[in-house]
Structure formats: C-alpha cells, structure tokens
C-alpha cells in the first residue's frame, strides 16, 4: 500500500525528493494532491508502507540541511 510521506509545494521539490529517496533505494510515486488549487499544484510524495520510516528519516535529514 502506498502512503503519503510528504506533500511538496510544487513538482520541482517533489522531483528532488524523489531522486533523493530513490538514491537510498526507496521506491517513490508522485501524484498531484487533490487539495491543490489552480495556482498551486501540491504534489504528494508516496512510498510503500514498509518504507515509510526510512523515507521520513531521509526527508527529515535533507530538510535540516
């Protein structure tokens, strides 16, 4: 089952996180959020339920830099 691990403010940020997670061997799926507006296209970064803790750790470390 796919779980949302992060909601990126745009496609560029989502793609950066996707690359970072995939580098760590985590499968990633991107999907436009149903809560996006016409002006702002939020993107859901999704990973498998089994990899959510590792993905959270990778994202948190990246955001601290």
Image (cartoon, helix red, strand yellow):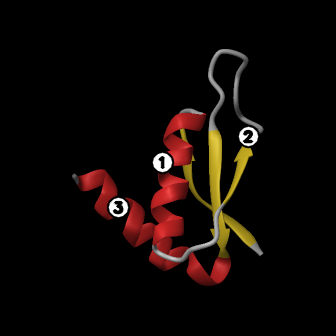
Cα–Cα span, label 1 and label 2: 15 Å
Q: In front: mark 1 or mark 3?
A: 1
Label 3 CA crowd tier, 10 Å (few <14, some 14–19, many 20+): few
Lower sequence index among marks 1 and 3: 1
Q: Which mark is residue 60?
A: 3
Cα–Cα span, label 1 and label 3: 14 Å
Residue extending furthest top? 39
Cα–Cα span, label 3 and label 2: 21 Å
- Compare residues 50 and 12 and report the one nearer the observer: 12
Q: Which residue is mark 2?
A: 32
Q: Which residue is mark 1?
A: 16
Lower sequence index among marks 3 and 2: 2
Lower sequence index among marks 1 and 2: 1
CB under 8 Å between callouts 1 and 3?
no
Q: Is residue 17 above or below residue 21?
A: above
x, y (%) of residue 21? 50, 65
Find numbered disc 1 in the image and state the secondary structure of the residue it sits on: helix
Q: Quadrant of residue 37?
A: top right
- Residue plotted at (55% across, 46% down): 15
């Amino acid at each position: 089952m796919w779980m949302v691990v992060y909601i990126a403010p745009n496609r560029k940020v989502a793609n950066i996180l996707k690359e970072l997670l995939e580098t760590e061997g985590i499968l990633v799926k991107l999907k436009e959020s149903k809560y996006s507006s016409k002006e702002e296209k939020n993107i859901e970064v999704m990973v498998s339920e089994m990899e959510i803790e590792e993905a959270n750790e990778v994202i948190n470390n990246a955001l601290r830099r």
